[in-house]
Amino acid sequence: MLVNLKEILAMAEKRKSAIGAFNTPNLECINAVLDAAEKLGEPVILSHAQLHEEISPLKVIGPVMVLLAERSSVPVCVHLDHCETLSYMERALEIGFTGVMYDGSTLPYEENVENTRKAAEMIRGYSCGLEAEIGAMASREGTGGPAAGPVYTDPDQAERFCSETGIDALAPSFGTAHGIYKAKPVLDFERVREISKRTGLPLVMHGGSGVSPEDYREGIRSGLRKINYYSYMARAGAGAVRDMLEKEDVTFFHDLAFRAQKAMEADAERAMRIFSMKE
Ligand SMILES: [Zn+2]
């Protein structure tokens, strides 16, 4: 069933667990994530990132995400990830997205506040929750490379930002990076706990792929309630395709796509088991 971001994060808060948010730029990804969630009976978030617009146009994938979320046996939030353009956000809301992230983290503080407030106004009247970000991570989503270096989120500024914008969830910067890690990340959980205490909001881990199970658990105990996970799942899909091409005589693309889907499902399931804090 389709639920909104506030509802699904309230479920996580009640269970002291986190909800996995998986980017789903194609049907194989959607199937992989929903099949894993349904198998485990876990609530889940399907995300569309604005930067995937070229490989996966919102007007095509968006309605498919919403339809399959509505039909699912588990609670599903359909979320817009790293939206930098308010007109793009409007389109997602019209399609029926129930969560949106406005990302003004590269803007000066005041401008980030101003645009995040506009986003908060925009979602009024929709069954939708708003996530926003302050501080900047070590790499921009999708670039895979280092940017100028991370700017860790200041707890004072986080508190001010949340009270000035009225958001429902905050993505702080505390040492994670997008994409595939080249070295083991060093995460500042003390900062997460402080931001959680000051803001009272559910916190979001970006760059959630490639973190150790112990670090996920520590992060969840510190207040993380949504974990964005994609790169390692997508890499598992690519690995399965490479393996199949090397070892088998493949004629049809649909066989490759299905193999990738099953590998991504297994990877997503592993992640969800950890995020659920049941084991
Ligand atoms: Zn992100």
Image (tube, rainbow, N blue to C red):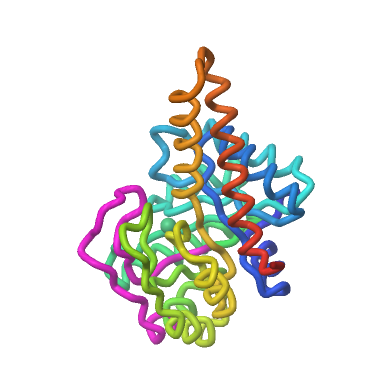
Q: How many marks?
A: 0
| Picture residue at 43% right of the left edge, 83% below the top | 191
- Considering every residue shown, the one lying at the far front of the view is 247
Rendered position, 198 above or below 146: below
Give percent across and percent down for residue 248. Answer: 51, 20
Residue 175 x %, y %? 36, 71
| Left or right: where 100 falls relative to 67 | left
Q: Where in the figure is residue 43, as x and y percent of width and height?
A: 70, 56
Residue 113 in view of the camera: no
Name the residue nearer the viewer: 90 or 247. 247
Above or below for 109 versus 129: below
Q: Which residue occupies the extreme top position in the image? A: 251
Residue drawn at x 47%, y 82% as measured from the top left: 195
Q: Per the image, is 147 magenta?
A: yes
View quadrant of ligand 1: bottom left
Say which quadrant the C terminus sits in: bottom right
Up-down relation of residue 23 to residue 215 (above or below): above
Q: Considering depth in this image, is 242 or 55 the residue closer to the camera?
A: 242
Magenta stretch: dominant SS?
A: loop
Q: Is residue 53 above or below residue 179?
A: above
Q: Is residue 240 visible?
A: yes
The boundaries of the magenta stretch are: 131-159
